[in-house]
Protein backbone atom coordinates (compact mmCIF):
# COMPACT_ATOMS: atom_id res chain seq x y z
CA UNK A 1 0.00 0.00 0.00
CA UNK A 2 1.74 3.10 -1.24
CA UNK A 3 0.66 5.93 1.03
CA UNK A 4 2.72 8.59 -0.71
CA UNK A 5 2.60 8.78 -4.48
CA UNK A 6 4.51 10.75 -7.03
CA UNK A 7 2.78 9.88 -10.25
CA UNK A 8 5.20 11.63 -12.58
CA UNK A 9 8.46 9.71 -12.75
CA UNK A 10 10.10 12.51 -14.71
CA UNK A 11 9.71 16.16 -15.64
CA UNK A 12 11.61 18.32 -18.11
CA UNK A 13 11.62 22.12 -17.81
CA UNK A 14 13.45 24.96 -19.51
CA UNK A 15 15.87 27.00 -17.47
CA UNK A 16 14.19 30.06 -15.99
CA UNK A 17 10.72 28.55 -16.08
CA UNK A 18 8.72 27.15 -13.18
CA UNK A 19 9.05 23.51 -12.14
CA UNK A 20 6.04 21.98 -10.41
CA UNK A 21 6.46 18.62 -8.74
CA UNK A 22 3.38 16.91 -7.39
CA UNK A 23 2.74 14.48 -4.59
CA UNK A 24 -0.44 12.78 -3.35
CA UNK A 25 -0.99 10.95 -0.11
CA UNK A 26 -3.69 8.70 1.24
CA UNK A 27 -3.23 8.78 5.00
CA UNK A 28 -5.20 11.63 6.55
CA UNK A 29 -3.15 11.24 9.75
CA UNK A 30 -0.01 12.61 8.10
CA UNK A 31 0.80 15.95 9.68
CA UNK A 32 4.28 16.81 8.44
CA UNK A 33 5.55 16.75 4.89
CA UNK A 34 9.04 17.09 3.50
CA UNK A 35 10.76 17.34 0.16
CA UNK A 36 14.17 15.83 -0.38
CA UNK A 37 16.47 16.28 -3.34
CA UNK A 38 18.83 13.57 -4.50
CA UNK A 39 21.73 13.76 -6.92
CA UNK A 40 23.12 10.55 -8.47
CA UNK A 41 25.43 8.59 -6.15
CA UNK A 42 24.53 10.82 -3.20
CA UNK A 43 22.10 10.58 -0.33
CA UNK A 44 18.83 12.55 -0.21
CA UNK A 45 19.24 16.06 1.16
CA UNK A 46 16.49 17.94 2.93
CA UNK A 47 14.99 20.76 0.89
CA UNK A 48 11.85 22.15 2.49
CA UNK A 49 9.02 21.05 4.74
CA UNK A 50 5.53 22.01 5.76
CA UNK A 51 3.32 21.08 8.68
CA UNK A 52 -0.36 20.38 8.28
CA UNK A 53 -1.34 23.60 10.05
CA UNK A 54 -0.02 25.58 7.09
CA UNK A 55 -0.90 25.59 3.42
CA UNK A 56 2.25 27.23 2.11
CA UNK A 57 5.91 27.45 3.03
CA UNK A 58 8.48 29.39 1.05
CA UNK A 59 12.26 29.29 1.09
CA UNK A 60 13.97 31.27 -1.63
CA UNK A 61 13.16 29.76 -5.01
CA UNK A 62 11.33 26.85 -3.40
CA UNK A 63 7.71 26.90 -2.28
CA UNK A 64 5.68 23.99 -1.01
CA UNK A 65 1.90 24.08 -1.14
CA UNK A 66 -0.33 21.79 0.87
CA UNK A 67 -3.98 21.06 0.04
CA UNK A 68 -5.21 18.90 2.90
CA UNK A 69 -8.70 18.39 1.53
CA UNK A 70 -7.25 16.99 -1.68
CA UNK A 71 -4.40 15.23 0.15
CA UNK A 72 -2.03 16.83 -2.29
CA UNK A 73 1.17 18.79 -2.03
CA UNK A 74 3.36 20.37 -4.62
CA UNK A 75 6.83 21.83 -4.83
CA UNK A 76 7.35 24.89 -6.99
CA UNK A 77 10.81 25.92 -8.11
CA UNK A 78 11.04 29.40 -9.63
CA UNK A 79 13.14 30.11 -11.58
CA UNK A 80 14.44 26.65 -12.40
CA UNK A 81 18.19 26.28 -12.82
CA UNK A 82 20.22 23.47 -14.40
CA UNK A 83 21.68 22.69 -10.98
CA UNK A 84 18.17 21.81 -9.82
CA UNK A 85 18.29 18.71 -12.02
CA UNK A 86 17.91 15.82 -9.58
CA UNK A 87 15.41 13.33 -8.22
CA UNK A 88 12.91 14.92 -5.84
CA UNK A 89 11.31 12.80 -3.14
CA UNK A 90 8.16 13.73 -1.31
CA UNK A 91 7.85 12.31 2.22
CA UNK A 92 5.21 12.36 4.92
CA UNK A 93 5.01 11.42 8.57
CA UNK A 94 2.31 11.19 11.19
CA UNK A 95 -0.34 8.93 12.57
CA UNK A 96 0.09 5.71 14.48
CA UNK A 97 3.22 4.48 12.75
CA UNK A 98 5.18 7.72 13.10
CA UNK A 99 7.43 6.61 10.28
CA UNK A 100 8.64 8.79 7.44
CA UNK A 101 7.06 7.44 4.27
CA UNK A 102 8.66 8.35 0.96
CA UNK A 103 7.25 8.61 -2.53
CA UNK A 104 9.14 7.00 -5.41
CA UNK A 105 10.59 10.26 -6.64
CA UNK A 106 10.37 12.49 -9.70
CA UNK A 107 13.41 13.06 -11.89
CA UNK A 108 13.60 16.75 -12.78
CA UNK A 109 15.70 17.76 -15.78
CA UNK A 110 16.22 21.50 -16.25
CA UNK A 111 17.34 22.21 -19.79
CA UNK A 112 19.75 25.15 -20.33
CA UNK B 1 33.02 17.67 7.38
CA UNK B 2 30.53 15.02 6.36
CA UNK B 3 27.59 15.02 8.76
CA UNK B 4 26.49 11.43 8.19
CA UNK B 5 29.18 9.19 6.78
CA UNK B 6 28.92 5.56 5.84
CA UNK B 7 31.42 3.03 4.55
CA UNK B 8 31.93 1.36 2.21
CA UNK B 9 30.28 3.34 -0.56
CA UNK B 10 30.43 0.42 -2.99
CA UNK B 11 30.46 -3.25 -2.10
CA UNK B 12 30.35 -6.23 -4.44
CA UNK B 13 30.21 -9.60 -2.76
CA UNK B 14 29.18 -13.17 -3.37
CA UNK B 15 26.02 -14.86 -2.19
CA UNK B 16 26.35 -16.42 1.22
CA UNK B 17 28.93 -13.95 2.50
CA UNK B 18 28.55 -11.82 5.62
CA UNK B 19 29.19 -8.11 5.32
CA UNK B 20 28.90 -4.96 7.41
CA UNK B 21 28.21 -1.34 6.59
CA UNK B 22 29.35 1.26 9.08
CA UNK B 23 27.75 4.60 9.81
CA UNK B 24 28.75 7.56 11.91
CA UNK B 25 27.13 10.93 12.48
CA UNK B 26 28.82 14.01 13.91
CA UNK B 27 25.67 16.08 14.29
CA UNK B 28 25.06 15.19 17.91
CA UNK B 29 21.74 13.63 16.98
CA UNK B 30 19.95 11.17 19.24
CA UNK B 31 18.30 9.07 16.54
CA UNK B 32 19.83 7.06 13.72
CA UNK B 33 18.27 5.01 10.95
CA UNK B 34 18.92 2.52 8.20
CA UNK B 35 16.93 2.93 5.00
CA UNK B 36 16.92 0.68 1.94
CA UNK B 37 16.30 1.84 -1.61
CA UNK B 38 15.42 -1.11 -3.80
CA UNK B 39 15.47 -1.56 -7.57
CA UNK B 40 12.05 0.09 -7.84
CA UNK B 41 13.46 3.18 -6.10
CA UNK B 42 11.29 2.75 -3.01
CA UNK B 43 13.07 4.26 -0.02
CA UNK B 44 11.94 2.38 3.08
CA UNK B 45 12.99 2.40 6.69
CA UNK B 46 14.56 -0.75 8.10
CA UNK B 47 15.65 0.19 11.60
CA UNK B 48 15.76 3.14 13.93
CA UNK B 49 17.76 3.62 17.12
CA UNK B 50 17.31 6.34 19.70
CA UNK B 51 20.19 6.72 22.13
CA UNK B 52 21.36 3.19 21.35
CA UNK B 53 17.88 1.76 21.89
CA UNK B 54 16.10 0.01 19.03
CA UNK B 55 12.77 1.78 18.46
CA UNK B 56 11.80 0.77 14.93
CA UNK B 57 12.34 -2.68 13.52
CA UNK B 58 10.54 -3.16 10.25
CA UNK B 59 9.79 -6.53 8.77
CA UNK B 60 13.23 -7.35 7.48
CA UNK B 61 14.88 -10.78 7.50
CA UNK B 62 16.74 -11.51 10.73
CA UNK B 63 19.87 -11.87 8.61
CA UNK B 64 20.00 -8.09 9.00
CA UNK B 65 21.24 -7.02 12.41
CA UNK B 66 21.86 -3.41 13.39
CA UNK B 67 24.30 -2.55 16.14
CA UNK B 68 24.67 0.78 17.89
CA UNK B 69 27.75 0.96 20.13
CA UNK B 70 26.97 4.58 20.95
CA UNK B 71 24.50 7.17 19.76
CA UNK B 72 26.89 8.45 17.07
CA UNK B 73 27.27 5.07 15.39
CA UNK B 74 24.85 2.62 13.83
CA UNK B 75 26.28 -0.31 11.90
CA UNK B 76 24.40 -2.78 9.74
CA UNK B 77 25.53 -6.37 9.58
CA UNK B 78 24.10 -8.71 6.98
CA UNK B 79 24.54 -12.48 7.19
CA UNK B 80 24.25 -15.00 4.38
CA UNK B 81 23.78 -12.41 1.67
CA UNK B 82 21.25 -13.14 -1.05
CA UNK B 83 20.84 -11.75 -4.56
CA UNK B 84 17.75 -9.84 -3.45
CA UNK B 85 19.75 -7.93 -0.90
CA UNK B 86 21.31 -5.93 -3.72
CA UNK B 87 20.21 -2.35 -3.10
CA UNK B 88 21.40 1.01 -1.87
CA UNK B 89 21.47 1.29 1.91
CA UNK B 90 21.26 4.75 3.43
CA UNK B 91 22.18 5.63 6.95
CA UNK B 92 20.47 8.69 8.42
CA UNK B 93 20.13 10.62 11.63
CA UNK B 94 17.84 13.18 13.25
CA UNK B 95 17.75 15.19 16.42
CA UNK B 96 14.59 13.51 17.64
CA UNK B 97 12.50 10.51 16.78
CA UNK B 98 10.46 10.32 13.61
CA UNK B 99 6.95 11.58 13.79
CA UNK B 100 7.77 14.84 15.52
CA UNK B 101 6.85 17.87 13.46
CA UNK B 102 9.94 19.81 12.50
CA UNK B 103 12.24 16.83 12.93
CA UNK B 104 14.44 16.62 9.84
CA UNK B 105 16.28 13.47 8.85
CA UNK B 106 19.75 13.81 7.38
CA UNK B 107 21.05 11.09 5.10
CA UNK B 108 24.45 9.68 4.34
CA UNK B 109 25.63 9.21 0.78
CA UNK B 110 24.52 5.61 0.56
CA UNK B 111 26.23 2.24 0.25
CA UNK B 112 25.72 0.44 -3.05
CA UNK B 113 25.59 -3.28 -2.28
CA UNK B 114 25.71 -5.75 -5.17
CA UNK B 115 25.41 -9.44 -4.45
CA UNK B 116 26.59 -11.73 -7.24
Image: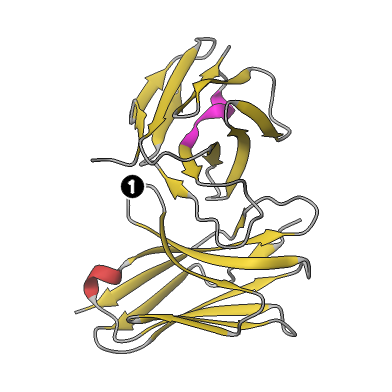
Q: Position of residue A62 (x, y in %)?
A: 39, 79
Residue A41: quarter of image: top left
Residue stretch rendered in magenta on the structure? B83-89
Viewport quadrant of the C terminus of chain B: top left
Q: Position of residue A7 (x, y in %)?
A: 59, 71
Q: Which residue is label 1 attached to?
A: A42
Residue A104: quarter of image: bottom right
Q: Position of residue A3 (x, y in %)?
A: 72, 61
Q: Is residue B67 above or below residue B47?
A: above
User: What chain does badge 1 belong to?
Assistant: A
Q: Is residue B5 left or right of residue A7?
A: left
Residue name at image x 65 percent, y 79 percent: A72
Check residue B85 for magenta coloring: yes
Looking at the image, which residue sits at the far bottom? A17
Q: Position of residue A100 (x, y in %)?
A: 62, 53
Residue name at image x 66 percent, y 54 percent: B99
Q: Is residue A17 left or right of residue B73?
A: left
Residue name at image x 48 percent, y 42 percent: B93
Viewport quadrant of the N terminus of chain B: top left
Amino acid sequence: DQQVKQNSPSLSVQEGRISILNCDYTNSMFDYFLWYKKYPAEGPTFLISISSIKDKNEDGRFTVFLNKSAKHLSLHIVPSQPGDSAVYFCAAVGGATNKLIFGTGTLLAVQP
Amino acid sequence: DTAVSQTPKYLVTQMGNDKSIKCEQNLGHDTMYWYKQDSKKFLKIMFSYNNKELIINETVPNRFSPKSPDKAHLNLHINSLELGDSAVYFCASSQRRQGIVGNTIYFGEGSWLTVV
